[in-house]
Structure formats: C-alpha cells, structure tokens
Amino acid sequence: MKKIYFAGSIRGGRVDAGLYARMIDYMKAKGHIVLTEHVGHPELNPLEQGKDRDGAIYAQDTAWLRESELLIGECTCPSLGVGYELAYAERFGKPCYIFYNRTKAQLSAMLTGDPYFHVFPYENEAELFAMLEKLL
C-alpha cells in the first residue's frame, strides 16, 4: 500500500475530471491511499475556491506532497499547478509518473526533457490503465 499524490488539472480546466476519478478509483481498488482524491470529484468547482483559500490549499497540497511516496499525474490538460506540483515533488525526491493522451496534447519539453520524470504517453484508456497496472 502506497500513499499517492494524484495530480490533475483543477483551475486549468476540468475536461478530464471523469478520467481522474476513474484513475483514482482504480488506485484505491488496488489498495493504495490517494491523498488527493478530491481532484476526481465532478462537482469540484475551481471558481468557488476563491483567493481567500489559496494559502490553505497551498499548505495542504505541499504537506500531502511531502507525505506521499510518489506522484502520479495526468497531464493531458495543461495546468500551472500540476507543473508546480511536479517540480515540488522532484525537489523532495518523490518518484513522478506522468501520463498524457498523445492524441490530444503535446507535453511540455520541461517535462519530457527532464530525465527525472517517468513519462507515459497513451492513446486510449485501455492503454493508460494497462500502464498504470504495471506501475502499481
């Protein structure tokens, strides 16, 4: 059982929220603890979060990052926050596994060019979950 920090876009766009939920459910079904399971909740509305909560969100997320054993990120939808989380995890030596749909996005060279990150392009969910199975 591992403590996983799942990273996915919130304020950058919620187009993949359903996929995030399926990935989180899959990891939990495998017996892992997903510290950020709220990222997959379909009713999570980034517009309701407000700047008055930004400090608390930062404190909680960075605490979860330090507590986690690894980071799994779905990066098809670009997100400044996910990019920051990846760099933060790298700083603390947390293994980082990045998934993205190569038919929908081109991942930043800042991620693909950094040998620290394990990058897994996929074309469909079956391929994604097969790679996730091997990883877990």
Image (tube, rainbow, N blue to C red):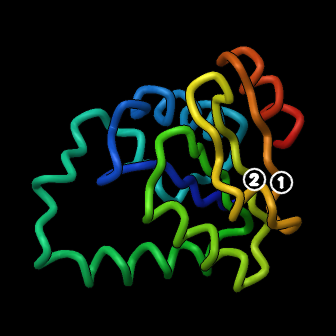
Q: Tell me which amino acid carries mark 1.
A: His
The disc label shown at residue 97, or none: 2
In the image, residue 22 sits, relative to residue 39, either above or below, namely above
N-terminal of the pair, mark 2 or mark 1, is: 2
Dot 2: within a 10 Å radius of its alpha carbon, few (fewer than 14), some, or many (20 or more) residues? many
| Residue depicted at x 59% and y 60% | 5
The C terminus, quarter of image: top right
Q: Do the residues under discs 2 and 1 have CB atoms within 8 angstroms?
A: yes
Q: Can you tell which quarter of the image residue 14 is in?
A: top left
Callout 1: SS: strand
Q: Quadrant of residue 23?
A: top right
Residue identified by numbered label 1:
118
Numbered-mark total: 2
**In the displayed structure, would residue 123 be above or below residue 69?**
above
Residue 114, located in which quarter of the rendered image? bottom right
Name the spot of residue 66 as percent of width and height, x first.
61, 81
Q: Residue at x 42, y 49 (%)?
A: 9
> What kind of element bears circle 2?
strand
